[in-house]
Every structure is written in structure tokens, then in C-alpha cells.
Amino acid sequence: MQPFPFFFFSPFLLFLIPSCSTQSEADFIVQTKSGRVRGFQVTVPDQSRPVVGFLGIPFGEPPVGKRRFRPAEPKRPWQGVYKADSYPNACFQFVDKSYPGFPGIEMWNPNREMSEDCLYLNIWVPSSVKPHNLPVMVWIYGGGFYSGSSSLDVYDGRYLASVENVIVVSMNYRIGAFGFLALDGTSEAPGNVGLLDQRMALQWVQNNIASFGGDPRQVTIFGESAGGASVGYHLLSPGSRPLFTRAILQSGVPNCPWASVTYAEARRRATHLANAVGCNGGNDTELVDCLRGKTPQELIDQEWQVLPWTALFRFSFVPVVDGEVLPDAPEAMVNSGDFKDTQILLGSYGSRKNVNTGAKPLLFKGQEKEPPDLQ
């Protein structure tokens, strides 16, 4: 709409202008269980429905120092109003520098400063006077469990929120050794803490999304590649099942050969990484203490050295069958019917379907339905 051409100016107009606004800054303040957060209005190109964004809301205490490799603790309540108007730090990760400046590579590299203080989530809410009981979609990024960030341009949730009139949530979770280094028998590095980060974010959504106008009974989790495998793990994990309603797995399932390792293999990789960075000898506690004394980049630089030379399409630090988060191997749990019985959408694309979803009949045994021919 073209602005009206005013040909005169009057103090009376100064009085009228503020009253013409339909939403004030106070409308973007939401009370959560942890404290108040302030969002901001986001425009969506080619869409008439604007969106209110809440970027970088903390859901976990920074997993730094002695908390490295351990399950995160929920964010403690804060005073005042938290300004949620910018994307958070990306979790520390491998950065692909093989083709500097090439958009097809750079689009997946972190576009924010990297930090171990990275447990934050983002929310996009369709802008209306009072949204109420809207469906919620929670995105879990992929990246082989070694890379990824909720701040990537391709994960901007404003478009989905505006077009489909749903609340969109995305979260960061620890990846690489920081999220998946595992030594069985020790609470200092039990493994799967990246999955527990995701679960903590899902619990935060259950506790708080109603305050944003969302319906905690209509939460769909969805992810691609390692994110799809993560969605599958939450379908299998007893502690995660109550925290969502439906699931979408895109180009990744938990029984992919690259998506998990045994505790024995996880220990071998952890020990190999320790040796590579100069943490030799001692018991598990001493090994973990030594690894905590290394800079994040020192660990990242050696991550790929832990893979067996025969490994093909494998990633260094991934989820482990720990008997708790993942009680048994995915195949065994599916065969015994031990998973969340709910509506599931599964998809793959092009050349990835054989590598990533070849185990589809196993994951959904008895539930398979061929998709319609859309050609």
C-alpha cells in the first residue's frame, strides 16, 4: 500500500500516530517459567501475515568447564526481561573449509560465533491479536551429529509460521565430541548428551509454549538427516515419548548404519581422541578431566582421526546404545514394538534414500504405506 501523501503537518498528527499502531512493544513480552522474554515483529516477504520472533531464549545452563560432556542443567530463572531479538551462538563444531566462498558449502557452516554456551532456542509465532492453541512444529537440524546450527538461513522459521499459521521452534544442541563422546560406566561422559539437550528443549516447549499461544498437545517434531535420526531416537526413548505428539523424519532414521555405535566403539573413539590431544594414561576420570582442559578447537581438529580407516559414510561421535536414553539397539526396539505409537511421516530425496533410509521397512514394520504417485 502506498503511503498517504500528507501536504501539511500539525501537532495533532503527533498525537494520532502512536494510536494507529496495532501492537506495542509490550505485546511482544511473554512470561515463561524461567522469566519474561521480549520478542520482535518480523516481516515475511510476499506474505501478508507478519510473525513475532523470539530468538536465542536460553533453555539450559552453559555446559562449560566441569559440565563439558555431561547432561546439561535447566536454565535458572532470571530477573527482568530477556531480550530475545538475535540468534544465539552456534555450538562448537567442525567448519568445512574445503571450498572457501562456495555457497553450497558456506550455507551449512555456522553463521554465528561458536561457543560451548549454545543451549538456546528460537520461536516464531504468527502475528495475531491473541494466538491460542496453535499447532507447534519443533525443528531438529541435521549435520551428521558433527555440524549444524539453528541460526542457518535455510532454517529461518518465519516462512513456515506465516504461511501455515503454526508456531515454529528450533533449538541448538551439542554436537561432535561435546555432545556424543561416551565412556560407559562414568557419569562424567555418559554419551548422548546432545540428545538430552534436544529432550530438554522439548520439555521447555511443553512447559512454556502455551504462553506463546501454542498447544502443547499438538507438538510435531521434525528433522533432516541426523535431525531425522534424532526424531527417531525420541520415538524410541521412553523419556522423550511424552514430550511430543507426531513426528516427521526426513532422510534419516535411527537404524541408519552411521547413526549410532556400541559403547565399546564409543570408548575406542574417545580414547583415540584423548591420545591425539595428549591425554594419555590414567583412569576415565583423569581422561575426562584432561579433555576438559583442552580448547574446543583442539578437540575439533582431531575428531576425524578417531574413525577406522575402513569407515565409509561414518561420523566420529554419534549416539550410543546406553541402556537409558536408548535402552536397546533401534532394530531390537522396533522389532519388539517398543516405540511411540503415533502418526509418522517419513521421506527421503534423490540419491540419499539408499544410504539414509534403506532401513525404512525395519523402522516402520507393520506401518508402511506407499506414498501416492504424484507424477
Image (cartoon, grey):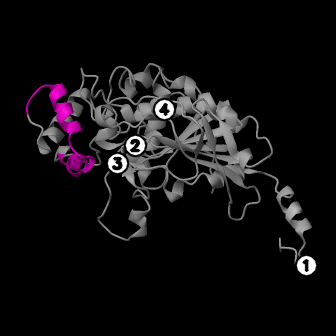
The reply to whether residue 250 is in sight is: no
Mark 2 to mark 4 CA distance (whole Å): 12 Å
Q: CA distance from mark 3 to mark 2?
A: 9 Å
In the rendered image, which residue does mark 2 sit on? 117
Quadrant in the picture for the N terminus: bottom right
Majority secondary structure of the magenta segment?
helix
Q: Earlier in the sequence, mark 2 or mark 4?
A: 4
Residues under labels 4 and 3: Cα distance? Answer: 19 Å
User: Looking at the picture, which amino acid does disc 2 mark?
Assistant: Asp
Looking at numbered disc 3 in the image, what kind of residue is underneath it?
Phe
Disc sitting over residue 75 in the figure? 4
Look at mark 1 in the image and give the residue it sits on: 8
Q: Residue furthest bottom?
A: 7
Give whichever of discs 1 and 2 has the lower sequence position: 1
In this rendering, the answer to whether 234 lies above or below 305 is above
* Mark 3 neighbour density, 10 Å: few (under 14) some (14–19) many (20 or more): many
Q: Earlier in the sequence, mark 3 or mark 2?
A: 3
Is residue 47 in the magenta section? no
Mark in the foreground, 1 or 2? 1
Q: Nearer the viewer, mark 1 or mark 3?
A: 1
Q: CA distance from mark 4 to mark 1?
A: 53 Å
